[in-house]
Amino acid sequence: MLRDKNKIIKSIEKINKLEEGLALFEEGDEEYLSVLVKIQGLYDEISDTALECFKDMTTKIRKTGQKRIEKGIDQLPHAIKESIAGQVNGFKGELFE
């Protein structure tokens, strides 16, 4: 993740420098258009990197959720046993009062 974050930061820094360089050219110049294309490419890279990070985080969230669900399922028999034992003790207490 940190590597991806740094990659995005570097791309943003490059975009900033290229945008500053746009002032050197007239809007209709071929060089101006070339710089715009480079900027667009950097935005595409940022988008691709962010999408990959999103996919990675979604996978981690799913795995974590799955582990929690499995842990909860594993604890069900114990929880049911305790609940039934509590109810039985309650019934016993009512019968012998």
Image (tube, helix red, strand yellow):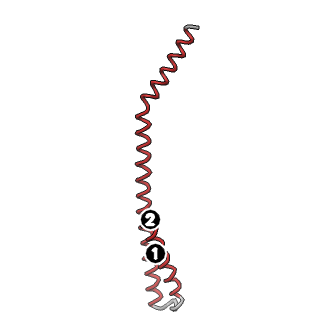
Residue 16 vertical placement versus 60 (above, below): below
Label 2 sits on a secondary structure element that is helix
Eye-nearest disc, 2 or 1? 2
Along the line of sight, which residue is nearer the eye, 81 or 43? Answer: 81
User: Which residue is label 2 attached to?
Assistant: 2
Along the line of sight, which residue is nearer the eye, 51 or 64? Answer: 64
| Quarter of image, res 42 | bottom left
Residue 17 vertical placement versus 29 (above, below): above
Q: Amino acid at mark 2?
A: Leu
User: Which residue is label 1 attached to?
Assistant: 11
| Quadrant of the rendering where the N terminus is positioned | bottom left
Mark pair 2, 1: CA separation: 14 Å
Binning the other alpha carbons within 10 Å of mark 2 as few (below 14), some (14 to 19) or many (20 upward) gives: few
- Of callouts 2 and 1, which one flags the residue occurring earlier in the amino acid sequence? 2
Label 1 sits on a secondary structure element that is helix
Q: Position of residue 79 (x, y in %)?
A: 46, 28
Q: Position of residue 94 (x, y in %)?
A: 57, 11
| Quarter of image, res 52 | bottom left
Q: Residue furthest right?
A: 97
Q: Residue at x 42, y 72 (%)?
A: 45
Q: Position of residue 14 (x, y in %)?
A: 47, 79
Q: Residue at x 46, y 70 (%)?
A: 8
Along the line of sight, which residue is nearer the eye, 57 or 44? Answer: 57
Residue 4 vertical placement versus 20 (above, below): above
